[in-house]
Image (cartoon, rainbow, N blue to C red):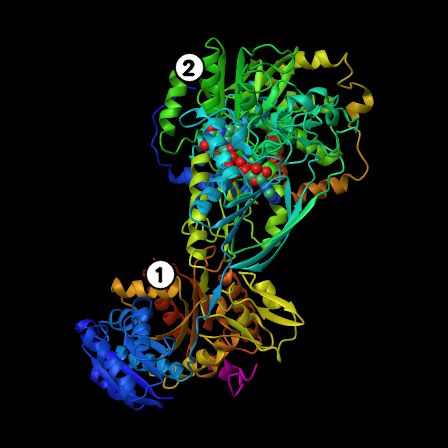
Amino acid sequence: MTEKTTMATATAEGEVFREKVLALAGEVVLTCIQCGTCSASCPTAHMMDTPIRKLVKLVLEGEKEAALLSRSIWLCTSCLLCTVRCPRNIRPMAVVAALKSIYEDEGMKCKDSVFEGIFARQIRNYGRISEVLLSAEYMIRSPSSAVQIMSFGAELVPKGKIELGFEAAKGERIEGTEEMKRIFDLVGDEKRAEAEKAEAVGEAEEATK
Amino acid sequence: MRIGVYVCHCGLNIAGVLEPSSLTEFAKTLPDVEVARDLQFTCSDTGQETIKEDIVEHKLDSVVVAACSPRLHEPTFRRVISEAGLNPFMLEMANIREQCSWVHMDEPPQAQEKAKDLIRMAVAKAALLNPLQGETMPVSRGVLIVGGGVAGIQAALDLADSGLHVYLVERKPTIGGYMALLTDVFPTNDCSICVLAPKMTDVYNHPLITLMTYAEILNIEGSVGRFTVSGVKKARFVDEKLCKGCINECAGVCPVEVPDEYEFGLGKRKAIYMPIPQSVPLIACVDPEACIGCGLCSEACPVDAVKYDQRQEEFRFDVGAIIVATGWQSFDPARKEEYGYGRFRDVITGLQVERLLNAAGPTGGEVVRPSTGEVAKSVAFLQCVGSRDETVGNQYCSRVCCMYALKNAPLIKEKYPDAEVSIHYIDLRAGGEGYEEFYMRAQRLGVNFIRGRVSEVEKVDGHLRVNYEDTLLGGFRSKPYDLVVLSAGLEANKEADVIGNLLGLSKRPDRFFEIAHPKMRPVEAHIDGVFIAGCASGPKEIQVSIAQGEAAAAKSMRLLLRGELTLDPVVAMVDTEKCIGCKLCVETCPSKAISVDKTALVDEAACKGCGTCAAACPVDAIDMRLFSDEQILAQVRAATAVKGQYPFIVGFLCNWCSYAGADLAGTSRIQYPTNMRAIRVMCAGRVDPAFVIEALKGGADGVLISGCRLGECHYSKGNYQAYQRVQVLRGVLEKVGINPGRVKIVWCAASEGEILAKEVRTFVRELKEMGPVGTELRVLGVPEPPGGDR
Ligand SMILES: Cc1cc2nc3c(=O)[nH]c(=O)nc-3n(C[C@H](O)[C@H](O)[C@H](O)COP(=O)(O)OP(=O)(O)OC[C@H]3O[C@@H](n4cnc5c(N)ncnc54)[C@H](O)[C@@H]3O)c2cc1C
Ligand code: SF4
């Protein structure tokens, strides 16, 4: 990223964004000392365009666009190492989660968010993931990026990391999927579910045209 | 009771707004008033003479001066009346300048009414005053110093030089503390033991210092001026009088080796050992845990000093003051598992590197990798290990680790110019005389500074790697090093807990001992006669530790040099008939001045007169000598006798912050409404719910209680207690149908005149909205406001 000269004071929109993140991730984020323990602990740091530490700073400066457009937020694996180690008891992972949810609230979309959406919905509906169905759906929704990961997927099959059997393709369910749904509702996932339904309908209409 | 009232004009300061002559006429109508006069300047010689003459001529018992703030001239007028033969405590002042004429300049008629009330209140209290005697008490001229680190050593020398007797008690077999183990020390890099050793020897040789090493204090009783201390000197199994300190003879033959705690595990010592070559006293010590009783040392000793049958000795002595200089302990870096201390041999601590750099240390001054014994070619210093880290419960900065890393990194660089030396830091803190210059010197010497807190130390292919984000350049890095030094922080010393408990010292959330005021009283404890110096009250460098040792010594001298103590008579007293021994007062007292043996007993030397106990006592068995329940209730009744204004507020202002803040509003001429009649109390914690109820019963529309800002109470926690009581009282008021908003508690510092004025303005507005007291009851159909007897 190249550094550009920007105004020192956040815009009104930036201000609102900052407050939203603080509301979701906690006021404690204000106490960040930019020590970098989070970024240095993160197992996917080497793939990130923006270190987690810098994401926090972008949030505090109200740099909404830069924060939301960073791919880093989709690379977080929720391993919580940052959160365990942060010397200020900030939960950097919660900042990432906040950014993801604002991203979706804003109606933004990218291949990563699409993938997460499918992933979450499968869990919600079946209580588990079927790699076959997941890949298939991802293929339909975001064909170009799915192609990119296909070769990686092909490598995993012989290692037994991906099941290709008929059972798997059917989408095996766990017992108590209703409870699963309730959990999702409790954590406030209806909005995403509705948005996706609308989207699916739209897509279907598009397809029938 | 025959009372004289003097109303001051103070030039036009008072007379410009109020009419002193009519106030004087008013005063004459009050009960017990024998004579009343208005004077141009009451504090002038003429004014003072008039009062003195009246006291004699009219046989006055007490005097009311309506003038400026008692915080200004109370001492003056106390002296005046005592010169005329009255007890100095037979004085009451009505503050009609700072809290009346200066703050109500635009409302002379209302101000005049308020001034009348203030005078009526003062006269009511004056009628109830009692002569008080500040008793004197002989004090011991000895001082106990706990801990023989540099802070304790300095205090001991200063005190003994001034002629007081010092008992210096140290747990370890030698004095010196951590400073005795450091290599060159910042900011001037002089050899630590070289500057400390002469002081240690001075302690040993001083005729007025009784040095007790390898000793433990087990009990402390009494209070300021007369503490009794007892404890034991542990057995060294070596006769102190016989041992010559040659050590090679005995330790040379001892077959047992154990890790040396004075080398922080890097070296070994024998079961019979000398802690450090410069030990004071220079006497060998047998470690009973390690000794196998082979008797070789005893045979080898040329003077037969080894005594296996030595017993511990008890001691007991009296002192007038105590200095706690118990120092610190290192954060245990093994708690930060990700840094590998204890797992990887080449990860060491700052203290260990001090020993490696020390020419007298285990490697003769070579900085080697413990795993190989070879000189380290690359060294990393990791800052803030166990400091500024909520995950280990230490929020605070340890203050000295930046500086000791800035010292040791260049020492390594100077010794091995080719070595690569880096400091991994979050912030570099080099505040202090010559400290920033010290930092620049390290930069010039080629020390590498990397900003970013290390996340982890790993071992990859047998080599240490340090992982971090360079937060200035951005991006993850992993860098190999031969040696990793953890700048472990300073923690409160657990070995001092016993002392803290015996004395009843309070601790801050960071677990260090708390000083009486975070700025203004840096070496005083909350307990009278107890002082805290050095790292016992928080991490600090040598220079500040010494300064605190000196300050604590000076404070002890001030207390004890005269040989007697004049006690403040404004203390609590217990009515043993009423006391039920519930111990509530013991819990409330910030000065640990109350003990209960069937009934409560106040140690008058320790009591500071805040009055929180008196407000807390459920059966009213405790009262204050000045500011008694009776006196304050009389002031409340006098205040509400007329109620010439609506809304009418009775205020209780704490002496130290809020009353001073109200005075400041006056000196700054900040104007506020005339509706409040303020009563001075020593602490907001003194305000008994009964006072508030009396005020409401008397028809006050609201009661304002103002204390020091939270955390700044003169007596530590009185304002918190006031707050709790007000909350409970509000709950009660609400239950009986009175708007709880009528009782308000606010915080105001002595510097915040504007805040006090604002609070009064707001309260007046709020009370106007509520309507006169009782409005809410009329709505409910309740005939009388409640209150009644407690
Ligand atoms: C690695 C390192 C390097 C440092 N380098 C420097 C430097 O270069 N320059 C500098 O200015 N500062 C330096 N410091 C700070 C310095 O060590 C402290 O300022 C100093 O030790 C404070 O002295 P003290 O007397 O308060 O405490 P201590 O040195 O801790 O002395 C306290 C004494 O009290 C004794 N004691 C404790 N409890 C009891 C008890 N219950 N009864 C009897 N005795 C008791 C202890 O045994 C000890 O002897 C360094 C610190 C570290 C960790
Ligand atoms: S002194 Fe420096 S290293 Fe030590 S805790 Fe403070 S900032 Fe961290």
Query: In this rendering, does residue B539 appear at all?
Result: no
Q: Which residue is mark 1?
A: B755
- Residue furthest to the front in view is B303
Magenta span contains residue B763: no
Quadrant of the image containing the N terminus of chain B: bottom left
In the image, what residue type sits under mark 1?
Ile
Tell which circle, 2 or 1, labels the residue nearer the N-terminal end.
2
Query: Horizontal and vertical percent for residue B235?
Result: 70, 39
The amino acid on which the numbered mark 2 sits, given as a three-letter code, is: Gly
Q: Residue at x 49, y 84 (%)?
A: B778
**Can you tell which mark lies on residue A126?**
none
Q: Closer to us: mark 2 or mark 1?
A: 2
Residue annotated with mark 2: B446
Residue B417: x percent and y percent?
45, 10
Q: Is residue B591 left or right of residue B642?
A: right
**Image quarter for residue B701?**
bottom left
Q: Chain of mark 1?
A: B
Q: Dot 1: within a 10 Å radius of its alpha carbon, few (fewer than 14), some, or many (20 or more) residues?
A: some
Q: How many marks?
A: 2
Viewer-side residue, A134 vs B156: B156
Q: Is residue B644 above or below residue B580?
A: below
Quarter of the image with the C terminus of chain B is: bottom right
A109 sits to left or right of A171: left
Q: Crowdedness of circle 2 by 10 Å Cα count: few (<14), some, many (20+)?
A: some
The magenta span reads B773-790
Judge by depth and name the residue closer to the eye, A146 or B9.
B9
Nearest the eye: B33 or B274: B274
Q: Is residue B212 above or below residue A108?
A: below
The answer as to whether callout 1 falls within 8 Å of ligand 2 is: no
Task: Give the overall secondary structure of the magenta segment.
Answer: loop
Chain of the residue on which disc 2 is drawn: B
Residue B181 visible in rendering: yes
